[in-house]
Image (tube, rainbow, N blue to C red):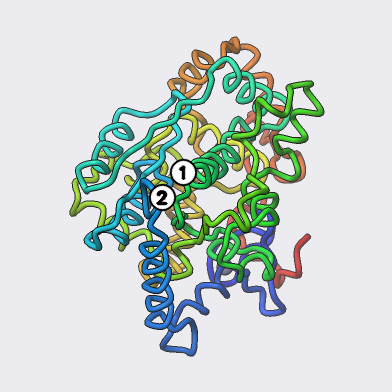
C-alpha cells in the first residue's frame, strides 16, 4: 500500500488518485477550500446560497420550502441550522432501517425542537432485511442498497411534495477525493448517484435483475430520473459552506446534540457515525477490503485542518483502525438479518483482501507495510 504524502489515505481507497508529488485528490480538494491561497471564495458561495433560498421561497410550494435529509448526526443538525431563522417551512426526512442506536434516536429528536417537521420513513422490513443480507453475503457490503435508499428516498419525497429545494450534505466526490467532472458539479445527478451512492454498479436495477425482485418494489432505492426538470433542485451544502466536522459538532452541540462518552469502536472520535448499529460493520468491511478504516478517515481530516501532525495521526490510526469487530455488533446484525453466527463469521472472512493482509507465525492477521511510507506513490487505479 502507498500512502498520500500529506495525509494517510492509502491508494487502495476507491475513487482516490495521487498526483506526481504523491498527494491525494482529497488533500488537493482541501487546498481548493482555502480562500487565503486563491481557493474557493466562500462569500460568493454564501451569496449563491441566499439566491437559492429566495427562489425556494418564491416558488410558493404547497407544504414545504426546503427539504433536508437527516440522520440525526451533527452534520444533519448543521444543515437544518443553515436554513433556520428565515421563516421557511422545513421538512427533515430520516430513513430508519430499524437498527438505530439509542443515542441516534435521542439526537434525531433534536430536529423538531429546532423548528423543522420530521418525517421518519421505515422501509418494508421483509424487503430491507433481505437486501441487507444479500449485500452482506454476496458483496461484503450490508449497506449495498441502504446507501442508495438513504440518498434516493428524500429526493422522491421532495419531488412528490413539490419542495423546490433539497439541501444535501457533503459532496463526497469533492471532499474525499473523486472524479473531477462529478466533484465540481453542485447538483445531485444520476452520474453522481451511480458513482457515489451505488457501490460499483450494484444498484437497485442490478439487484432487481440479479435476484428477481420486481423493480417496482425497489423504486425508492433508485435515483428518480424525473428529478431534473421537476421543479425540485437538489444541491450539496458543502458547495456553499466550508465542510468541517469540528465546526459542525460545535453548531450541533448548541442545539442539544450529544456525542458518545467514549470513542466509537474503530476510531478516536466520539461523535461520528454513532446513529446506526450497522455502521461499524460497514466500516469493518472497509478495513478487510482496503486495509484502512474510520480512524484513518478522521485522522486525515484532522491532519488537513492542522489539528494533528501526520505522526500523531499515524499513532491514532495504529491504536484504532484495525481493531477486530466486537461481539455485540455481530449479535445485533444476526438478530436483524436472521443470519446464524457461524454463517456471519464464514462470510466476513471471505472479504479479507489477501493482497493486503498476511498472517504471522501465531496465525494473527497483520498488514505488511502498514503506515510505512515507501517509494513515492504513483497514479492509482
Ligand atoms: Zn492526502
Q: Residue at x 39, y 32 (%)?
A: 120
**In front here: 49 or 237?**
49
Q: x%, y% of residue 199?
A: 68, 43
Determine if the C-beta at disc 2 is less than 8 A from ligand 1: no
Above or below 151: residue 132? above
* Residue at the spot of label 2: 67
Q: Are marks 2 and 1 in contact (CB under 8 Å)?
A: yes
Q: Residue at x 43, y 21 (%)?
A: 328
Above or below 121: residue 357? below
Sequence-wise, which precedes: disc 2 or disc 1? Answer: 2
Q: CA distance from mark 2 to mark 1?
A: 10 Å
Q: Residue 307: which quarter of the image?
A: bottom left
**In front here: 129 or 379?**
129
Q: Is residue 317 visible?
A: yes
Q: x%, y% of residue 174?
A: 57, 66
Q: How would you rate the neighbour count of disc 1 (Cα within 10 Å): few for under 14, some for 14-19, many for 20 or more?
A: some
**In front here: 124 or 23?**
124
- Taking the image in four quarters, ligand 1 sits in the one at bottom right
Q: x%, y% of residue 115?
A: 22, 48
Q: Is residue 12 visible?
A: no
* Residue at the spot of label 1: 161
Q: Residue at x 53, y 20 (%)?
A: 124
Amino acid at each position: 500500500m502507498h500512502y498520500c504524502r500529506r495525509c494517510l489515505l492509502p491508494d487502495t481507497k476507491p475513487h482516490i488518485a495521487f498526483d506526481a508529488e504523491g498527494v491525494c485528490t482529497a488533500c488537493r480538494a482541501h487546498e481548493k477550500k482555502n480562500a487565503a491561497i486563491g481557493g474557493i471564495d466562500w462569500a460568493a458561495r454564501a451569496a449563491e446560497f441566499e439566491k437559492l433560498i429566495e427562489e425556494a421561497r418564491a416558488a410558493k410550494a404547497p407544504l414545504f420550502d426546503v427539504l433536508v435529509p437527516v440522520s440525526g448526526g451533527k452534520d444533519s443538525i448543521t444543515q437544518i441550522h443553515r436554513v433556520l431563522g428565515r421563516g421557511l417551512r422545513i421538512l427533515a426526512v430520516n430513513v430508519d432501517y430499524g437498527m438505530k442506536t439509542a443515542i441516534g434516536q435521542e439526537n434525531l429528536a433534536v430536529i423538531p425542537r429546532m423548528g423543522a417537521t420530521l418525517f421518519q420513513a421505515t422501509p418494508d422490513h421483509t424487503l430491507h432485511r433481505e437486501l441487507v443480507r444479500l449485500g452482506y453475503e454476496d458483496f461484503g457490503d450490508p449497506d449495498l442498497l441502504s446507501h442508495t435508499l438513504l440518498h434516493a428516498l428524500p429526493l422522491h419525497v421532495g419531488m412528490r411534495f413539490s419542495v423546490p429545494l433539497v439541501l444535501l450534505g457533503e459532496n463526497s466526490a469533492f471532499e474525499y477525493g473523486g472524479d473531477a467532472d462529478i466533484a465540481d458539479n453542485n447538483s445531485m445527478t444520476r452520474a453522481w448517484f451511480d458513482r457515489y451512492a451505488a457501490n460499483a454498479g450494484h444498484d437497485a436495477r442490478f439487484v432487481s435483475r440479479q435476484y428477481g425482485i420486481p423493480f417496482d418494489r425497489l423504486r425508492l432505492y433508485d435515483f428518480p430520473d424525473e428529478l431534473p426538470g421537476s421543479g425540485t433542485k437538489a444541491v450539496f451544502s458543502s458547495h456553499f459552506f466550508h465542510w468541517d466536522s469540528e465546526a459542525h459538532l460545535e453548531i450541533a452541540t448548541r442545539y442539544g446534540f450529544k456525542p458518545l462518552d467514549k470513542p466509537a469502536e474503530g476510531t478516536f472520535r466520539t461523535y461520528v457515525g454513532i446513529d446506526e448499529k450497522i455502521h461499524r460493520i460497514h466500516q469493518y468491511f472497509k478495513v478487510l477490503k482496503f486495509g484502512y478504516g474510520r480512524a484513518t478517515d478522521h485522522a486525515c481530516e484532522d491532519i488537513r485542518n492542522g489539528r494533528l501532525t501526520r505522526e500523531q495521526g499515524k499513532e491514532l490510526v495504529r491504536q484504532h483502525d484495525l481493531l477486530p469487530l466486537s461481539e455485540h455488533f455481530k449479535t445485533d446484525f444476526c438478530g436483524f438479518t436472521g443470519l446464524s453466527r457461524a454463517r456471519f463469521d464464514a462470510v466476513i472472512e471471505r472479504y479479507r483482501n489477501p493482497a493486503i493482509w498476511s498472517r504471522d507465525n501465531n496465525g494473527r492477521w497483520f498488514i505488511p507495510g502498514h503506515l510505512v511510507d515507501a517509494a513515492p506513490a504513483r497514479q492509482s487505479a
